[in-house]
Image (cartoon, rainbow, N blue to C red):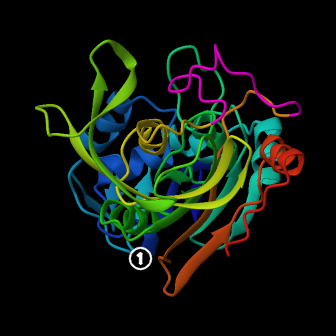
Amino acid sequence: MSETDAAGAKPAVSHVEVTADDEGMRLDRWLRQQFPSVPFGALSKVVRTGQVRVDGARAKLETRLSAGQSVRLPPIMVAETAAPPRAEGDGASLDAMVIHRDDALVVLNKPFGLAVQGGSGLSRHIDGMLEAWRDRKGRKPRLVHRLDRDTTGVLVVALTRAAAAHLAETFKGRDAHKDYLALVRGHPNPPEGRIATWIARDPEDGEKMRAYRDKTKESQRAISDYETLDRSGQLSLLKMMPVTGRTHQLRVHAAHMGTPIIGDSKYFNIENWALPGGIQNRLHLHARRIRLPHPAGGTLDVTAPISQHFQQSLNVLGLSEAES
Protein backbone atom coordinates (compact mmCIF):
# COMPACT_ATOMS: atom_id res chain seq x y z
CA MET A 1 0.00 0.00 0.00
CA SER A 2 1.27 3.52 -0.72
CA GLU A 3 0.34 7.10 0.10
CA THR A 4 0.25 9.88 -2.49
CA ASP A 5 1.20 13.53 -2.46
CA ALA A 6 -1.43 16.29 -2.45
CA ALA A 7 -1.79 16.20 -6.21
CA GLY A 8 -2.19 12.44 -6.16
CA ALA A 9 0.43 12.17 -8.86
CA LYS A 10 2.87 9.67 -7.44
CA PRO A 11 3.64 7.70 -4.29
CA ALA A 12 5.10 9.66 -1.38
CA VAL A 13 5.72 6.75 0.98
CA SER A 14 5.19 3.02 0.73
CA HIS A 15 4.31 0.33 3.26
CA VAL A 16 5.66 -3.18 2.63
CA GLU A 17 4.53 -6.21 4.63
CA VAL A 18 7.21 -8.57 5.89
CA THR A 19 6.67 -12.05 4.47
CA ALA A 20 6.99 -15.35 6.31
CA ASP A 21 10.16 -16.06 4.30
CA ASP A 22 11.80 -12.97 5.86
CA GLU A 23 10.87 -13.87 9.45
CA GLY A 24 13.75 -13.02 11.79
CA MET A 25 15.81 -11.10 9.22
CA ARG A 26 17.67 -7.99 10.38
CA LEU A 27 16.29 -4.72 9.03
CA ASP A 28 19.57 -3.75 7.37
CA ARG A 29 19.78 -7.07 5.51
CA TRP A 30 16.10 -6.87 4.56
CA LEU A 31 16.63 -3.41 3.07
CA ARG A 32 19.67 -4.56 1.12
CA GLN A 33 17.60 -7.43 -0.25
CA GLN A 34 14.78 -5.07 -1.23
CA PHE A 35 17.06 -2.42 -2.74
CA PRO A 36 20.19 -4.13 -4.11
CA SER A 37 21.15 -1.08 -6.21
CA VAL A 38 21.02 1.41 -3.30
CA PRO A 39 24.36 2.00 -1.49
CA PHE A 40 24.35 0.68 2.06
CA GLY A 41 25.32 4.10 3.38
CA ALA A 42 22.12 5.58 1.98
CA LEU A 43 20.05 2.77 3.48
CA SER A 44 21.69 3.31 6.86
CA LYS A 45 20.95 7.03 6.76
CA VAL A 46 17.20 6.68 6.20
CA VAL A 47 17.03 4.24 9.12
CA ARG A 48 19.08 6.42 11.49
CA THR A 49 16.98 9.49 10.68
CA GLY A 50 13.72 7.66 11.35
CA GLN A 51 12.48 7.70 7.76
CA VAL A 52 12.11 3.91 7.83
CA ARG A 53 9.64 2.69 10.46
CA VAL A 54 8.43 -0.75 11.51
CA ASP A 55 4.77 -0.90 12.54
CA GLY A 56 4.88 2.88 12.89
CA ALA A 57 7.84 2.94 15.27
CA ARG A 58 11.44 3.99 14.72
CA ALA A 59 13.78 1.06 14.21
CA LYS A 60 17.49 0.30 14.26
CA LEU A 61 19.59 -1.43 11.62
CA GLU A 62 19.82 -4.52 13.81
CA THR A 63 16.05 -4.71 14.47
CA ARG A 64 14.73 -8.23 13.78
CA LEU A 65 11.62 -8.32 11.61
CA SER A 66 8.57 -10.53 12.10
CA ALA A 67 6.16 -11.81 9.48
CA GLY A 68 3.19 -9.50 9.05
CA GLN A 69 4.94 -6.35 10.23
CA SER A 70 4.62 -3.23 8.07
CA VAL A 71 7.79 -1.43 7.01
CA ARG A 72 7.34 2.22 6.03
CA LEU A 73 9.64 3.33 3.21
CA PRO A 74 10.33 7.04 2.59
CA PRO A 75 9.70 8.81 -0.73
CA ILE A 76 13.37 8.63 -1.71
CA MET A 77 13.15 4.82 -1.75
CA VAL A 78 9.72 4.30 -3.29
CA ALA A 79 11.00 4.72 -6.84
CA GLU A 80 13.44 1.88 -6.23
CA THR A 81 10.62 -0.64 -5.64
CA ALA A 82 10.11 -1.06 -9.38
CA ALA A 83 11.34 -4.32 -10.81
CA PRO A 84 15.03 -4.18 -11.76
CA PRO A 85 15.99 -4.42 -15.42
CA ARG A 86 15.97 -8.03 -16.54
CA ALA A 87 18.57 -9.56 -18.82
CA GLU A 88 16.16 -11.31 -21.14
CA GLY A 89 18.86 -13.40 -22.79
CA ASP A 90 20.02 -14.76 -19.44
CA GLY A 91 16.46 -15.44 -18.33
CA ALA A 92 15.75 -17.47 -21.46
CA SER A 93 19.03 -19.38 -21.07
CA LEU A 94 18.19 -20.26 -17.47
CA ASP A 95 14.67 -21.31 -18.43
CA ALA A 96 16.12 -23.71 -20.99
CA MET A 97 18.21 -25.38 -18.25
CA VAL A 98 15.29 -26.01 -15.86
CA ILE A 99 14.50 -29.69 -15.21
CA HIS A 100 12.49 -29.16 -12.01
CA ARG A 101 10.74 -26.16 -10.48
CA ASP A 102 8.52 -25.67 -7.43
CA ASP A 103 7.79 -22.87 -4.94
CA ALA A 104 10.99 -23.44 -2.96
CA LEU A 105 13.67 -24.32 -5.51
CA VAL A 106 14.72 -24.84 -9.10
CA VAL A 107 16.97 -27.59 -10.42
CA LEU A 108 19.07 -26.75 -13.48
CA ASN A 109 20.93 -29.01 -15.88
CA LYS A 110 24.13 -26.98 -16.10
CA PRO A 111 25.84 -27.11 -19.50
CA PHE A 112 29.52 -27.63 -20.21
CA GLY A 113 31.80 -24.60 -19.94
CA LEU A 114 29.47 -22.37 -17.90
CA ALA A 115 30.84 -21.36 -14.49
CA VAL A 116 28.57 -21.37 -11.45
CA GLN A 117 30.21 -18.33 -9.82
CA GLY A 118 32.41 -15.50 -11.01
CA GLY A 119 36.18 -15.52 -10.98
CA SER A 120 39.20 -14.19 -12.77
CA GLY A 121 38.47 -13.68 -16.47
CA LEU A 122 34.84 -14.81 -16.17
CA SER A 123 32.18 -12.44 -17.50
CA ARG A 124 29.24 -14.87 -17.55
CA HIS A 125 28.22 -17.35 -14.87
CA ILE A 126 25.11 -18.82 -13.26
CA ASP A 127 25.23 -16.53 -10.23
CA GLY A 128 25.27 -13.46 -12.46
CA MET A 129 22.58 -14.84 -14.74
CA LEU A 130 20.27 -15.30 -11.74
CA GLU A 131 19.89 -11.51 -11.69
CA ALA A 132 17.36 -12.10 -14.46
CA TRP A 133 15.19 -13.99 -11.97
CA ARG A 134 15.00 -11.26 -9.31
CA ASP A 135 11.42 -10.60 -8.30
CA ARG A 136 9.76 -7.19 -7.86
CA LYS A 137 11.05 -7.02 -4.30
CA GLY A 138 14.60 -7.47 -5.50
CA ARG A 139 14.98 -11.00 -4.15
CA LYS A 140 17.43 -13.07 -6.14
CA PRO A 141 17.52 -16.90 -6.16
CA ARG A 142 20.42 -18.30 -4.15
CA LEU A 143 23.09 -20.84 -5.01
CA VAL A 144 23.37 -23.56 -2.37
CA HIS A 145 26.17 -25.66 -3.87
CA ARG A 146 28.39 -25.57 -6.94
CA LEU A 147 29.81 -27.56 -9.83
CA ASP A 148 33.13 -27.07 -11.60
CA ARG A 149 32.93 -24.99 -14.76
CA ASP A 150 33.28 -27.95 -17.13
CA THR A 151 31.18 -30.40 -15.08
CA THR A 152 27.64 -30.75 -16.38
CA GLY A 153 24.40 -31.73 -14.70
CA VAL A 154 22.27 -31.18 -11.61
CA LEU A 155 22.53 -27.79 -9.91
CA VAL A 156 20.04 -26.80 -7.18
CA VAL A 157 19.05 -23.14 -6.72
CA ALA A 158 16.93 -21.92 -3.78
CA LEU A 159 14.10 -19.49 -4.51
CA THR A 160 13.50 -18.36 -0.92
CA ARG A 161 15.66 -17.51 2.06
CA ALA A 162 14.11 -20.31 4.11
CA ALA A 163 14.79 -22.85 1.37
CA ALA A 164 18.38 -21.62 1.06
CA ALA A 165 18.97 -22.05 4.78
CA HIS A 166 17.44 -25.55 4.74
CA LEU A 167 19.46 -26.65 1.71
CA ALA A 168 22.70 -25.19 3.06
CA GLU A 169 22.31 -27.32 6.17
CA THR A 170 21.44 -30.33 4.02
CA PHE A 171 24.64 -30.07 2.00
CA LYS A 172 26.72 -29.26 5.07
CA GLY A 173 25.32 -32.25 6.93
CA ARG A 174 25.91 -34.65 4.02
CA ASP A 175 22.20 -35.39 3.62
CA ALA A 176 22.37 -34.69 -0.11
CA HIS A 177 23.16 -37.82 -2.13
CA LYS A 178 24.73 -37.15 -5.53
CA ASP A 179 25.47 -39.61 -8.33
CA TYR A 180 27.94 -38.66 -11.07
CA LEU A 181 28.87 -40.36 -14.32
CA ALA A 182 32.54 -40.29 -15.30
CA LEU A 183 34.23 -41.68 -18.41
CA VAL A 184 37.80 -42.61 -17.46
CA ARG A 185 40.89 -44.09 -19.04
CA GLY A 186 41.69 -47.51 -17.65
CA HIS A 187 39.81 -49.86 -15.35
CA PRO A 188 39.64 -49.34 -11.58
CA ASN A 189 40.94 -52.23 -9.49
CA PRO A 190 38.82 -53.29 -7.70
CA PRO A 191 35.93 -52.41 -10.07
CA GLU A 192 33.98 -50.85 -7.21
CA GLY A 193 34.87 -49.52 -3.79
CA ARG A 194 35.67 -46.45 -1.72
CA ILE A 195 38.49 -43.92 -2.08
CA ALA A 196 39.50 -42.20 1.15
CA THR A 197 42.34 -39.67 1.05
CA TRP A 198 43.29 -36.23 2.30
CA ILE A 199 43.04 -33.38 -0.22
CA ALA A 200 44.85 -30.03 -0.21
CA ARG A 201 45.90 -27.33 -2.65
CA ASP A 202 48.84 -28.46 -4.77
CA PRO A 203 51.88 -26.49 -3.53
CA GLU A 204 53.40 -26.60 -7.02
CA ASP A 205 50.25 -25.42 -8.83
CA GLY A 206 47.71 -23.31 -6.96
CA GLU A 207 45.03 -24.06 -9.57
CA LYS A 208 45.06 -27.77 -8.74
CA MET A 209 44.34 -30.01 -5.77
CA ARG A 210 46.40 -32.99 -4.64
CA ALA A 211 45.47 -36.23 -2.87
CA TYR A 212 47.54 -37.36 0.12
CA ARG A 213 47.44 -40.72 1.83
CA ASP A 214 48.25 -39.14 5.20
CA LYS A 215 46.92 -35.99 6.83
CA THR A 216 48.87 -32.78 6.28
CA LYS A 217 48.50 -29.40 7.95
CA GLU A 218 46.37 -27.96 5.14
CA SER A 219 44.50 -31.07 4.00
CA GLN A 220 40.86 -32.08 4.45
CA ARG A 221 39.39 -35.58 4.52
CA ALA A 222 37.88 -36.61 1.18
CA ILE A 223 35.79 -39.75 0.59
CA SER A 224 34.23 -41.00 -2.63
CA ASP A 225 32.46 -44.23 -3.57
CA TYR A 226 32.60 -45.57 -7.11
CA GLU A 227 31.24 -48.39 -9.23
CA THR A 228 32.21 -49.57 -12.72
CA LEU A 229 29.10 -49.61 -14.91
CA ASP A 230 30.60 -50.63 -18.26
CA ARG A 231 33.87 -50.98 -20.18
CA SER A 232 35.07 -50.52 -23.74
CA GLY A 233 38.71 -51.11 -24.69
CA GLN A 234 40.86 -48.90 -22.50
CA LEU A 235 37.91 -46.90 -21.16
CA SER A 236 35.48 -47.38 -18.27
CA LEU A 237 32.19 -45.73 -17.40
CA LEU A 238 31.96 -45.12 -13.67
CA LYS A 239 29.26 -44.05 -11.28
CA MET A 240 30.93 -41.88 -8.65
CA MET A 241 29.27 -40.83 -5.40
CA PRO A 242 31.02 -38.19 -3.28
CA VAL A 243 30.57 -38.62 0.45
CA THR A 244 32.38 -35.36 1.19
CA GLY A 245 32.42 -32.28 -1.02
CA ARG A 246 35.98 -31.06 -1.56
CA THR A 247 37.19 -28.95 -4.47
CA HIS A 248 37.78 -31.12 -7.57
CA GLN A 249 37.25 -34.18 -5.37
CA LEU A 250 36.01 -36.68 -7.97
CA ARG A 251 38.54 -35.52 -10.54
CA VAL A 252 41.40 -35.86 -8.06
CA HIS A 253 40.19 -39.25 -6.82
CA ALA A 254 39.77 -40.65 -10.34
CA ALA A 255 43.33 -39.62 -11.19
CA HIS A 256 44.56 -40.94 -7.83
CA MET A 257 43.20 -44.41 -8.75
CA GLY A 258 45.15 -44.27 -12.00
CA THR A 259 41.98 -43.78 -14.05
CA PRO A 260 41.82 -40.06 -14.91
CA ILE A 261 38.63 -38.61 -16.36
CA ILE A 262 38.58 -38.08 -20.10
CA GLY A 263 38.94 -34.43 -21.06
CA ASP A 264 40.24 -33.32 -17.65
CA SER A 265 42.90 -30.77 -18.58
CA LYS A 266 44.10 -30.39 -14.98
CA TYR A 267 44.49 -34.00 -13.93
CA PHE A 268 44.90 -35.96 -17.18
CA ASN A 269 47.82 -35.31 -19.50
CA ILE A 270 46.90 -36.90 -22.84
CA GLU A 271 50.14 -35.87 -24.55
CA ASN A 272 51.15 -39.49 -25.12
CA TRP A 273 47.66 -40.90 -25.55
CA ALA A 274 45.18 -40.38 -28.36
CA LEU A 275 41.45 -40.04 -27.81
CA PRO A 276 39.40 -42.64 -29.68
CA GLY A 277 37.76 -41.27 -32.81
CA GLY A 278 34.45 -39.52 -32.26
CA ILE A 279 35.20 -38.50 -28.66
CA GLN A 280 35.60 -34.81 -27.87
CA ASN A 281 38.38 -33.62 -25.58
CA ARG A 282 35.89 -32.22 -23.06
CA LEU A 283 35.52 -33.13 -19.41
CA HIS A 284 33.36 -36.26 -19.16
CA LEU A 285 31.96 -35.71 -15.67
CA HIS A 286 28.20 -35.34 -15.30
CA ALA A 287 26.17 -34.76 -12.12
CA ARG A 288 23.49 -37.28 -13.05
CA ARG A 289 21.17 -37.42 -10.03
CA ILE A 290 20.51 -35.76 -6.69
CA ARG A 291 18.37 -36.90 -3.76
CA LEU A 292 17.82 -34.77 -0.67
CA PRO A 293 15.19 -33.75 1.88
CA HIS A 294 12.93 -31.12 0.30
CA PRO A 295 12.51 -27.87 2.29
CA ALA A 296 8.73 -28.33 2.17
CA GLY A 297 8.87 -31.98 3.25
CA GLY A 298 9.36 -35.25 1.42
CA THR A 299 12.28 -35.99 -0.88
CA LEU A 300 13.61 -34.20 -3.93
CA ASP A 301 14.88 -36.77 -6.47
CA VAL A 302 15.95 -35.34 -9.83
CA THR A 303 17.93 -36.85 -12.70
CA ALA A 304 19.59 -34.68 -15.36
CA PRO A 305 19.80 -35.77 -19.01
CA ILE A 306 23.36 -36.51 -20.09
CA SER A 307 25.20 -33.71 -21.89
CA GLN A 308 25.51 -33.92 -25.65
CA HIS A 309 29.26 -34.56 -25.84
CA PHE A 310 29.08 -37.24 -23.11
CA GLN A 311 26.17 -39.01 -24.79
CA GLN A 312 28.01 -38.93 -28.12
CA SER A 313 30.99 -40.68 -26.49
CA LEU A 314 28.75 -43.36 -24.97
CA ASN A 315 27.17 -43.97 -28.36
CA VAL A 316 30.54 -44.21 -30.11
CA LEU A 317 31.90 -46.63 -27.52
CA GLY A 318 28.70 -48.63 -27.13
CA LEU A 319 28.69 -47.99 -23.39
CA SER A 320 25.61 -48.11 -21.17
CA GLU A 321 24.99 -46.63 -17.72
CA ALA A 322 22.43 -49.37 -16.92
CA GLU A 323 23.50 -51.07 -13.71
CA SER A 324 23.77 -54.84 -13.82
Magenta stretch: includes residue 272: yes
> Quadrant of the rendered structure where residue 200 is?
top left
Disc 1 target residue:
68
Given residues 307 and 52, the one toward you in this image is: 307
- Disc 1, SS: loop
Q: Which residues are magenta?
A: 262-278
51 to 26, vertically: above or below: above
Residue at 38 percent of width and 61 percent of height: 171
6 to 128, vertically: above or below: below
Given residues 278 and 206, the one toward you in this image is: 278
User: How many numbered discs?
Assistant: 1
- Can you see residue 83? no
Q: Residues within 10 Å of mark 1 (few under 14, many from 20)?
A: some
Q: Which SS does the magenta portion mostly show? A: loop
Magenta stretch: includes residue 102: no
Q: Amino acid at mark 1?
A: Gly
- Can you see residue 11? yes
> Quadrant of the rendered structure where residue 49 is?
top left
